[in-house]
Each structure stands twice: as C-alpha cells, then as structure tokens.
Amino acid sequence: MENKHLHEILSEQQYSFKPYFAERVIAKIEEGAQGIVSPFKSVLDFLFPKISGIALVASIVLLVISINSTGSFDFDSLTGLNTLEENVFYQDDIELF
C-alpha cells in the first residue's frame, strides 16, 4: 500500500532543466575525456614504427629466400605447398590410431 502511494507521488513529479542541459553535460564529459591518455596507445605509438620496420625487413628477407630456393614466385612456393606430394592426403595405408 505504501509503495503504491509512493509510486503515485513520484510519477506526478515534473522535472525541469535549464536550457541546453544535455549539451552542457556532453561538453563536460568530452572535456574530461580529452585529458585521459591510454598508456597502451602511447606505447603503441612509440613502438609501432620500429616494429613495422623490422617486420617489413623480415618479410622481404623471407620473400628473397623463397624466390631463391624455388626459383619462382607464386602462392604455393610462399606457403611451402609445392614441396608436398599431391597424394599424401589420399593414402589409404596410413593408420590413424
């Protein structure tokens, strides 16, 4: 009974805010968020150029090794699939267990 009466009183209340209340709240939130800098982002900004340069050099070296060892440049030679025999997956005499 008491909850019903309380619900009726609260539902009759009218809330009013000053003009541009939502805009002011959003501006305060954005103002506070600008001062926050993620430590992960700062570390990533520092390390990414160094790591990407090393990765680029490593991929070029691997590409040159692949071309020199196979004599061609195609997807199979890059993945190493050209060294597999075609029938290795279809052999019946392989015991699984």
Image (tube, rainbow, N blue to C red):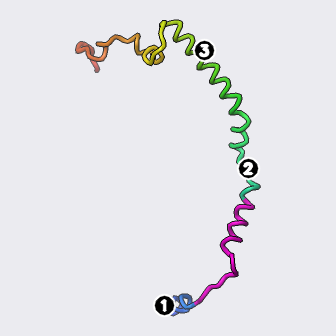
Check disc 3: other Cα within 10 Å, few if <14, some if 14-19, many if 20+: few
Where in the figure is residue 1, as x and y percent of width and height? 47, 93
Circle number at residue 63: none
Q: Is residue 40 above or below residue 74?
A: below
Q: Is residue 14 above or below residue 82?
A: below
Q: Is residue 84 magenta?
A: no
In the picture, residue 54 is in which quadrant? top right
Residue tagged by mark 1? 4
SS at circle 2: loop
SS at circle 1: helix
Residue tagged by mark 3? 61
Type of the residue with mark 1:
Lys
Which is more foreground, mark 2 or mark 1? 2
What residue lies at 53% left-to-right and 6% top-to-bottom? 68
Type of the residue with mark 2:
Val
Q: Earlier in the sequence, mark 3 or mark 2?
A: 2
In the picture, residue 94 is in which quadrant? top left
Which is more foreground, mark 1 or mark 3? 3
Check disc 2: other Cα within 10 Å, few if <14, some if 14-19, many if 20+: few
Q: Are marks 1 and 3 in contact (CB under 8 Å)?
A: no
Where in the figure is residue 79, as x and y percent of width and height? 46, 18
Q: Earlier in the sequence, mark 2 or mark 1?
A: 1
Type of the residue with mark 3:
Val
Which is more foreground, mark 3 or mark 2? 3
What residue lies at 63% left-to-right and 23% top-to-bottom? 56
Where in the figure is residue 97, as x and y percent of width and height? 28, 21
Span of residues in magenta:
13-32
- 72 horizontally vs 52: left or right: left
Circle number at residue 37: 2
